[in-house]
Amino acid sequence: MADLTNSSRSRGGEPRTDAVEVIGGGRENLVPGTPLLEVDDLHVEFVTRDGVAKAVNGVSYSVSAGETLAVLGESGSGKSVTAQAIMGILDMPPGRITAGRILYRGEDLLTMGSRARRAVRGQKIAMIFQDALSALNPVLSVGYQLGEMFQVHHGVSRKEAREKAVELMDRVRIPAARQRVGDYPHQFSGGMRQRIMIAMALSLEPDLIIADEPTTALDVTVQAQVMDLLAELQHEFHMGLILITHDLGVVADVADTIAVMYAGRIVETAPVRELYARPAHPYTRGLLDSIPRLDQKGQNLHAIKGLPPSLLRIPQGCAFNPRCDRVQDRCLTELPPLVPVVAADGAELPGRRSACHFWRETLDG
Amino acid sequence: MGSYVLRRVLQMIPVFFGTTLLIFLMVYTLPGDPVTALFGEKAADPAVVASIKHQYYLDQPVWKQYLHYMGNLFQGDFGTSFTGRPVSDIMANAFPVTIRLALLAFVFELVLGLALGLVSGLRRGSIQDTLVLVLTLVVISIPVFVLAYIAQTIFATNLGWVTPTVQDSRDLSQLILPAIVLGSLSLAYVARLTRTSIGENLRADYIRTAVAKGLPRRTIVSRHLLRNSLIPVVTFLGTDLGALMGGAIVTEGIFNVQGVGNVLYRAINQKEGPTVVGIVTVLVIVYLVASLLVDLLYAVLDPRIRYA
């Protein structure tokens, strides 16, 4: 892992707990409206045998306390890579961040020292992974893995940590938490495992949670339960939430804002309801059209033709042009910038942006 | 767990009978007559030969000899060697020496092998890693007797730190050099196995989680990485402990260590059936017990493995 190899030299007589002063402090110190996290023009690429894969090409987004930002996109769109860059868990090498800033409460995480960075990780920004079975350590009890957060970051005793673990398991509504605290990940069901991941992320009451496809590996009924739990806890703690998903259904209920990513760029951002009602990018429209609907039973699904581009060879101009059904000559040569979307009468649509030359036409249907 | 252990112990019984019978047959079907050989160049008196043969049950058919041997074995009698010494007496002298030698070699390969594997696994592609890879490759490709003679030449002849051969096999300090030679091949395997295992687990999702939790590197390596990485290494180490006990023939021969390997080698040369069968039987049991312990240790290291 990135941090494992980089910080190895600065390991002298380090204290067991984190004495590092954490920037920011409590959530109440935050000026309302100022973003908790700002990703600014982030570029990430991976050096592979076949060339340089440009995974993230100038992504900017921000999240405030209490806000839920859904980052939507197919696999390979760069949504997870952006999240990994925020957490500092990119594999470097082969990955490298070539440009951009990631500001947490105004401080750039990318230029921060490794210890200060570590103090942010887990305590201030936590992450929930897709596959809880592989993301949890198979040979350590869930109680230990939960309690470890308190042992390492707060320096509490093993016994106290176990108590905290039981509390956390109760909080994410795992039945018989006290009896199950010594159990191992494989002894839990998929939904329960994901609850444990959520509990782990929540343990130190971070400002921001990044959930990378938190429900993809779960049954549909369990998905809803886990999403509800996540939304509820987010509300309770007034945290920012970045929800990374490819599932439009998951997003609709919980997100405030959506950022749609394609080939390492954000192609559209909008408040969730407006995006569903009137997408301003052909790719978003394609995604929405490809959701099966009961009232269109018997008709063909509108799948987006073709496949996402190889990140080694992103098409000239608009990356979506080979798959777009509205493609014009201009799209083949000129990269469309992410511009504000305004209504037909010139009224501003707050939060709406599109990276399509013909957003106006797309918006009109 | 208890029933699993019982089942494994019961499984040892047929293995025990099978191996003893096999060894017994092998020794007794060897060409040449051990009793005549005792007389060397001198012409043997047929009457004396016949009486010795009768004394050692050698005038009986093989299956009767085997039954006789096993019958005695279950009364705790391993038989008598041709020199008249009880085999149990011979083993009581040889095994402590070999156990010491094997344990020394085992500690050497365990500690150094794990350390080298850890260093190179954590820093793949570094100079340390390349060095470990090259050194282990060299050790693996050199036959153990060559290694033994090189060690003898350097440390005894050139540097004069030790005597070329062991004078007193009970002296632990004299066993260090033979133990290093004995353990070096396994050390190379342990180092490489650990390196691969560490490298694989380093890319595992749960390590990424541990980093995302903001854990210090030391905690990540010792708590999360090592235990998962050790599982395949433990299998190797367990079976190797058995192999070290029996596989010391060459090393013991070169360094003149009066252990099991040396005794066994002599016994095979002189076709001393009781001694060979006795020693091999004990080694088989050691092997079986070691592999049972490895399997049990597995369950300790990996909670996903449960025996019922």
Image (cartoon, coloured by chain):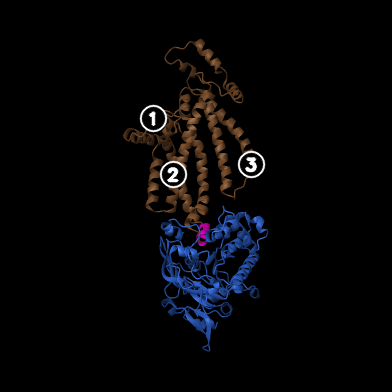
Chain colours: A blue, B brown
Q: Is residue B11 left or right of residue A262?
A: right
Marks 3 and 2, Cα distance to the nearest angstrom?
34 Å
Q: Is residue A133 highlighted in magenta?
A: no
Upstream in sequence: badge 1 or badge 2? 2
Q: Position of residue B199 (x, y in %)?
A: 46, 53
- Residue B112 is marked as 2
Q: Is residue A229 left or right of residue B97?
A: right
Q: Tell me the amino acid under the disc marked 1.
A: Thr
Which is nearer the N-term, disc 1 or disc 3? 3
Q: Nearer the viewer, residue B270 or B84?
A: B84
Residue at mark 2: chain: B
Mark 2 and mark 1 in contact (Cβ < 8 Å)? no
Disc sitting over residue B4 in the figure: 3
Look at mark 1 in the image and give the residue it sits on.
B165
Boundaries of the magenta span: B205-213
Instruction: Check the residue under mark 1 and report the chain it is in.
Output: B
Question: If the image is split into quadrants, where does the C terminus of chain A sit?
Answer: bottom right
List the single residue furthest toward the left: B158
